Amino acid sequence: MSAQRRQAARRDATAAAPPGAAPSPRPVAPSPRPASPRPAAPSPRPVAPSPRPAAPSARPAAPGPGGDRGKVAPVTGRVDARLGGVRRVYQDSMAEIRKVNWPDRETTKNLTLVVIGVAAVLGVLLGGIDFVLRLLFEALP
């Protein structure tokens, strides 16, 4: 939900509050746009945060006497989590690349010629300035 829609929802919720209700903890600035003709949305109930799951221990528990000595603890959970993150980044990147409005061949050719032309003109200009300044500094005693 965008920030503007959240602000509008808060504004609608405070406008629909009953007369005896406590005021909002933060004053909301009036919107520069006119009020919408839609009826105000009911105030959402506050949601209690869900309890945070216990983090898995980074180090496995020590084995008992004569137990699992020399065995390596499995790390598949961490590897799967890391690969899942990489997979998610790849999928998000591909989704963004599909949204790009790629130029056609003619536009690409024209813009490439413009870039090459500007680079050549600037190169000649800076080379000329460098040449003139070098002549001036060599002429000084």
Image (spheres, rainbow, N blue to C red):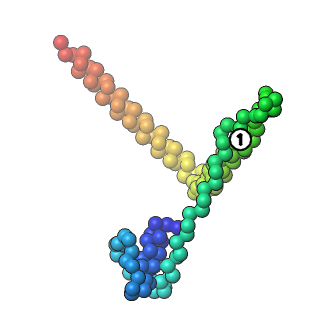
Q: Which quadrant of the figure contains the C terminus?
A: top left
Q: Is residue 47 left or right of residue 18?
A: right
Q: Examine the rendered structure and indicate whether residue 37 appears above or below residue 99.
A: below
Number of marks drawn: 1
Name the one closer to the observer, 91 or 27: 27
Q: Amino acid at mark 1?
A: Val
Q: Residue at 48% of width from left, 86% of height from top? A: 39
Tell me residue 99's x, y (percent): 60, 58
Q: Residue at 38% of width from left, 32% of height from top? A: 124
Name the one closer to the observer, 70 or 33: 70
Tell me residue 45's x, y (percent): 53, 75
Q: Examine the rendered structure and indicate whether residue 9 appears above or below residue 51.
A: below
Tell me residue 140's x, y (percent): 19, 16
Answer whether residue 31 is visible to the viewer in this image: no
- The residue carrying mark 1 is 79
Q: Examine the rendered structure and indicate whether residue 125 appears above or below residue 111.
A: above
